Image (cartoon, rainbow, N blue to C red):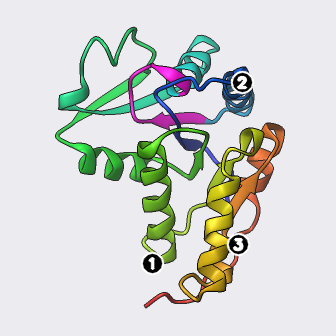
Amino acid sequence: MDKIKSLCIFTGSSPGKDSIYRLEAKKLAMLMVQNGISLVYGGGNRGLMGIIADTVSSNGGHVTGVLPEKMDLPSVRTKDVESKLIIVKDMHERKKTMYGLSDAFLALPGGIGTLEELMEIFTWKQLKYHDKPVGILNINGYYDTLLSFLDKMVTEGFLDKKIKESLSVIDKTEDVLERLSALQKELPDKL
């Protein structure tokens, strides 16, 4: 794959209880800035999302936020960190816009919204709506249970092993860019 120029991050609008999540989010943001990679994210600046956006912005990086009209609130946008803010009609348009602007996708720890975004973009890859890298930054083993469940899907015949293996599972922040930029294998047909 060509060099990643824009990375879409899915992560929590909460900071998490363990400080490791915040530290690794800042480390990832700095890695992006140092490599000239723009951030694409869901807008706002709370939680881990806010830490990444603020760190990229404060260090001269480019930040594109995509926010639904309903969420364009002072409680969500506590300060302006975006180089470009796109206001869209709803969550469906938000995700479609984010996906179109991004060269790769990475999930950090988060809640059900993060999980939903990760699973949707991973499903789109399985169905060949895109061939962009999709990964998980598995900070502190946060996604271990999900990964076990994906293994169960393979074992039970509901998920092709090659598709499961196309999800880059990254344990160290410093390995993110190398792992996401690695040559992607041809996936089997889901249809």
Name the residue at 55% across, 52% down: 103
Horizontal side of 123 relative to 160 (left or right) equals left
Q: Earlier in the sequence, mark 1 or mark 3?
A: 1
Q: Quadrant of the C terminus?
A: bottom left
Q: Where is residue 56 in the image (x, y as percent from the top left)?
A: 60, 21
* Element assignment for label 3: helix
Name the residue at 74% across, 26% down: 20
Q: Residues within 10 Å of mark 1 (few under 14, many from 20)?
A: some
Residue 165: give its label. Answer: 3
CA gap, disc 3 and disc 2: 28 Å
CA gap, disc 1 and disc 2: 33 Å
Horizontal side of 93 relative to 167 (left or right) equals left
Q: Where is residue 100 in the image (x, y as percent from the top left)?
A: 40, 53
Residue type at mark 2: give it.
Met
The answer to whether the residues at label 1 and label 3 have Cβ atoms under 8 Å apart is no
Q: Is residue 186 visible?
A: no
Q: Is residue 145 visible?
A: yes
* Element assignment for label 1: loop
Name the residue at 68% across, 44% down: 142
Q: Quadrant of the N terminus?
A: bottom right
Q: Front-most of 64 and 54? A: 54
State whether residue 15 is above or below residue 112.
above
Residue 3: give its label. Answer: none
Magenta stretch? 38-48
Residue receiving disc 2: 30
